[in-house]
Image (cartoon, rainbow, N blue to C red):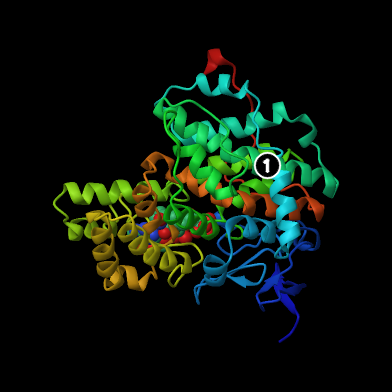
Amino acid sequence: MSNKATIEVNGQKHEFPLVTGTENEVAIDIKTLRGVTGGVTTIDPGYKNTGSCESGITFLDGEKGILRYRGYSIEELAEKADFLEVAYLLIFGELPNQDELDKFHSDIKAQSIVDEDVKKILDAFPKSAHPMGVLASLTSALTAFNPTSVNVDSEDEMYNAIVRILGKFPVLVAWTLRKKKGLPLDYGDKSLGYVENILKMMFKQPNEDYDLSPILVNALDKLLILHADHEQNCSTSTVRIVGSSHAGLFASISAGISALWGPLHGGANQAVLEMLEAIKEDGGDTKKYMSKAKDKDDPFRLMGFGHRVYKNFDPRAKIIKSAADEVLSDLGIEDPILDIAKSLEQEALNDDYFVKRKLYPNVDFYSGIIYRGMGIPTEMFTVMFALGRLPGWISQWKEMRLRKEPIGRPRQIYTGENLRPFVDIKNR
Ligand code: SDX
């Protein structure tokens, strides 16, 4: 195959190099397009056909349903690794040995205290505030309390910022939940594992010890791994473009949280549960909701279905679906919502509208069922997604900064008014 692409514009032919990745993906490098064509650019709403960067972190094959972090399959990592190991892998590129992992964890624990004044910001929010809005604000506020973690250029300075946010973010997540429940805010227990401490900080009642359930620890660890990165999705692209202006890591992560909040993205896990609840209240009439989803005049979509990249099963959805069965039965929970989800999936997989458009269950379709079984409130589901995605956001931000990528600034095609003279208000 030739390693060049030819584009003809206004009778002029221009050649552009092809970039081929390690998994044989091919892109046309159009860095010189505007210059050689006298101003012609491309346009691609939603960037469905446009790559923003080269990256060595995560590989997806949407047609085959493949997901790998730094070359390791999501199936192996979900089964054999733990979340902190996967965070290290994403951020530093290699699986850690025991000493490296222990040092990483102790550096994180050393940064797991949040300034008491952050509680005053939290107190200013009404209990009705959505946790994602609270978390985005508190994460951005971390910049004010950790000023040395803003303009970081060296890998050492980045490491300090990275262990800070990995130490403090779980505290902010737990505080966001506990504030909503009117519970006292504490810092958990440094003697515990990373995920164990998250559960304790979230759920410990002030008047009793907290007994860690291995079922819940394993379930959360696996869910966080499955959400840890997903190449250039909406929120990760947000983190990269905000970081490309050299805004600090915390501010970039805060922007990513806001992007993830949307119901078309991470907010879908909350929307799926609300949809399943509505179907249950409606007598379990899945066919009614299927026809709503297919009706162009109805804004309703089957939440948790479809994906920009996966035109096959989302490998994470498969793992979460089987985990949902395990966790609920281990916890002795019979949740009719799971049965409704399974019958919806079956109907959609046999429905021409969904088959033709290659719409399959995505990561958000079953995850909320497990979160609910674990006692996590529905409004906190997307916060749990953010907790998992944190190492992915960090790794992508770090890669972009270390590669000294240019500030993100897309072009446009102007379709507004042509030049016209100002008209004084008395003549309008
Ligand atoms: C995540 O990008 C990532 O990697 C994201 C993520 C990650 O890990 O970061 O994987 C996490 O965000 C998963 C997606 C969660 N969102 C949802 O479950 C919301 C429901 N899904 C849809 O809104 C939609 O499928 C998107 C947003 C996920 C993808 O939208 P696209 O790629 O822009 O596709 P599209 O809207 O152009 O849809 C193509 C067709 C359209 O029909 P036609 O105009 O061709 O007739 O499929 C239809 C759409 O109407 N369609 C759906 C549908 N999803 C797409 N119809 C009904 N129900 C749906 N869920």
Local packing at callout 1 (Cα closer than 10 Å; few below 14, some 14-19, many 20+) is many
- Answer above or below: position of 49 versus 405: below
Residue behind mark 1:
109
Q: Nearer the viewer, residue 147 or 297?
A: 147
| 190 relative to 33 in the view: left or right | left
State the residue in front, 134 or 119: 119
Write down the quadrant of residue 9 in the picture.
bottom right
Q: Residue at x 37, y 40 (%)?
A: 377
The picture places residue 88, in percent across and down from the top left corner, at 69, 57
Task: Report the amino acid beneath label 1.
Answer: Lys
Horizontal side, residue 195 vs residue 168: left or right:
left
Instruction: Please tell me which residue lies in front, 252 or 342.
Output: 342
Q: Reply above or below: 276 against 312.
A: above
**Does the image show residue 373?**
yes
Q: Residue at x 55, y 51 (%)?
A: 388
- Residue shown at the point (52%, 54%) measured from the top left: 224
Residue 413 visible to an observer of this rendering: no
Is residue 90 toward the left or the right of residue 331 in the image?
right
Q: Position of residue 391 (x, y in %)?
A: 63, 52
Taking the image in four quarters, ligand 1 sits in the one at bottom left
- Numbered-mark total: 1
Residue 59: where, in percent of width, then height?
A: 62, 69
Location of residue 108 (image quadrant): top right
> Which secondary structure, mark 1?
helix
Residue appearing at x 71%, y 87% in the figure = 1
Foreground residue, 279 or 178? 178
